[in-house]
Image (tube, helix red, strand yellow):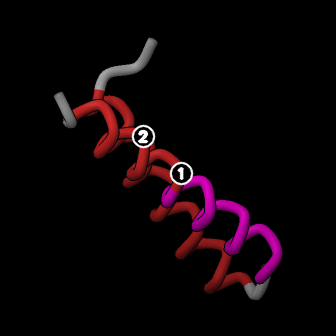
Amino acid sequence: MATAARHRQICEMFLAHAQEQLYRGDFLQASEKAWGAVAHRVEALAKQVP
């Protein structure tokens, strides 16, 4: 099971990949990566709640 810190790392990785895809003009992949980043950030936040 991933920790909150690991979910934040994955979020940042997905955001970087989303930006790359935007520059390439692949909006479908960019949106998928952005959605993945949001999901991992929510997971990180949820793991911080007692």
Q: Does 40 appear in magenta? A: no
Q: Residues within 10 Å of mark 2 (few under 14, many from 20)?
A: some
Q: Are marks 1 and 2 in contact (CB under 8 Å)?
A: yes
Which residue is tagged 1? 39
In the displayed structure image, the side of residue 18 where residue 38 appears, left or right: left
* Label 1 crowd (10 A; few <14 / some 14-19 / many >=20): some
Quadrant assignment, res 34: bottom right
Q: Is 3 left, or right, of 49 in this rendering?
A: right
The residue carrying mark 2 is 43
Element at badge 1?
helix
The dominant secondary structure in magenta is helix
Q: Residue furthest top?
A: 1
Q: Amino acid at mark 2?
A: Glu
Tell me the quadrant of the picture where the C terminus can be found: top left
Q: Amino acid at mark 1?
A: Ala
Of residues 48 and 33, the one nearer the viewer is 48
User: In x, y percent, where is residue 1?
Assistant: 45, 12
Q: CA distance from mark 1 to mark 2?
A: 6 Å
Residue 31 disc label: none
Spot occupied by residue 48 in the image (x, y as percentages of width and height): 20, 35
Residues in magenta, as a range? 27-38
Q: Which residue appears at 68% of the width and 73% of the height?
A: 30
Residue 17 in the image: above or below residue 50: below
